Amino acid sequence: MTGLRDILERHVSSGSLPGAVGLVARGDRVEVEAVGSADAEGTAPMVRDSIFRFASLTKPVTAAAVMMLVEEGRLALTDAVAPWLPEVASPVVVRTPASPVDDVVPADRLITVSDLLTFRAGYGFPSDFSLPAVGLLFSELKQGPPQPQQVAAPDAWMKALSRIPLLYQPGEAWLYNTCSDILGVLIARVTGQSLPEFLAERIFEPLGMADTGFAVPAGDLGRFTTLYRGGDGGLEPVDAPHGQWSSVPAFPSGAGGLVGTADDWYAFARMLLAEGALDGDRGRLLSAGSVRMMTTDWLTPAQRAGAELFLEGQGWGFGGSVDVTQSDPWNVPGRYGWVGGTGTAAHVTPATGAVSVLLTQLEMTGPTPPAMTREFWTYAAGA
């Protein structure tokens, strides 16, 4: 029978990636395998606590932080975000998604907290990246593959956002990524703390996520993996341990800025499975109701269909996808989580108590998860 180590070693030995860490938990049984090397040169072995760029595995963490503020009464899901984000207080929308960026109409209503959590605010990536308004997300906001040191500080970033029209009316369509970055700015402005400070104090420290943050301390760079891009010429280095995550960036991305380990994300996953409770008798991070809202699909069938390139028929909760059908061996209704463009994936399945975390350092070539990820999911589902 094929085991977790067999799956990881097969792909590493093929030369398609230097190494990987996989974690699969089913109840109290936790299986962890680390194979290969932290870089293509083989200078350091991959270990259980190797540090990876989480990329979009950041999104569920950002959503949890917002829900903490909702529980404290500092925000409400139905609140317009304009009081904290005046840059989007008078949004305009391109007349059609393909219209020029100066052919706009007023938004029907203001953007709410719920719009941002469900990725239906009107900002973000559709299936067609060539649309004029989408081009501005790349050129003005530096959306796309994480590049933390290249992005402007939050106030300047929000000023740039204010000049970009919405692609759809608020609430109309699901669009990828940008809403999580806006939520990161919202958290900072509501709390008066930077996003790194708030997440460290309120989530990482209580959960024991000791290696998670927006930069890797100098003393831990020896455990930080090198990021690669695949191609016909083999593996091409994209970011080294001493590169873009060696210092805290001006713009800490709530969409894709975090680094961490498999065990760190597993600690976050255990909190979700426990419906917000911390390990032992240490209270709660979130209420059970907040966790259920995070892990519930909020999209209409038409919105799911319009997001097929990214979601492949899945729904979307707050900060992560939610499986709504059993269309594949690994597709378990209620499974919540997401994938990261740096080669990461993490999910929890409340109905079965399962957790799966896969960390590699090979960039995805597009929104579709690679074969290794799907094989890992099938194993994690016990199929």
Image (cartoon, rainbow, N blue to C red):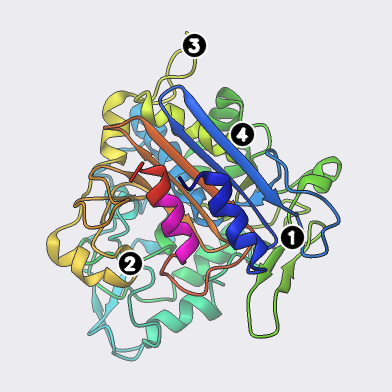
Q: Are marks 4 and 2 in contact (CB under 8 Å)?
A: no
The percent position of residue 6, horizontal first and vertical second, equals 56, 50
Check if residue 277 falls in the magenta segment.
no
Q: Amino acid at mark 1?
A: Thr
The percent position of residue 51, horizontal first and vertical second, equals 69, 46
What numbered label is drawn on residue 200? 4
- Residue located 46% across and 50% down the image: 59
Q: Is residue 156 left or right of residue 182?
A: right
Task: Return the residue at label 1.
Answer: 226
Q: Nearer the viewer, residue 61 or 352?
A: 352
Alpha-carbon neighbours of circle 2 within 10 Å: few (<14), some, or many (≥20)? Answer: many
Q: Range of the magenta residues?
A: 371-377
Task: Return the residue at label 2.
Answer: 175
The percent position of residue 219, horizontal first and vertical second, equals 86, 41
Element on which disc 1 rests: loop
What numbered label is drawn on residue 280? 3
Establish if 84 lies above or below 205. Answer: below
Q: Amino acid at mark 3?
A: Gly
Q: Nearer the viewer, residue 3 or 48?
A: 3
**Quadrant (top left, top right, bottom left, bottom right) of the N terminus:** top left
Marks 3 and 4, the one that precedes in the sequence: 4
Q: Nearer the viewer, residue 15 or 145?
A: 15
Establish if 261 lies above or below 36. Answer: above
Quarter of the view holding residue 97: bottom left
Report the Cα–Cα distance between label 4 and label 2. 28 Å
Alpha-carbon neighbours of circle 3 within 10 Å: few (<14), some, or many (≥20)? Answer: few
Element on which disc 4 rests: helix
Marks 2 and 3, the one that precedes in the sequence: 2
Marks 2 and 1, the one that precedes in the sequence: 2
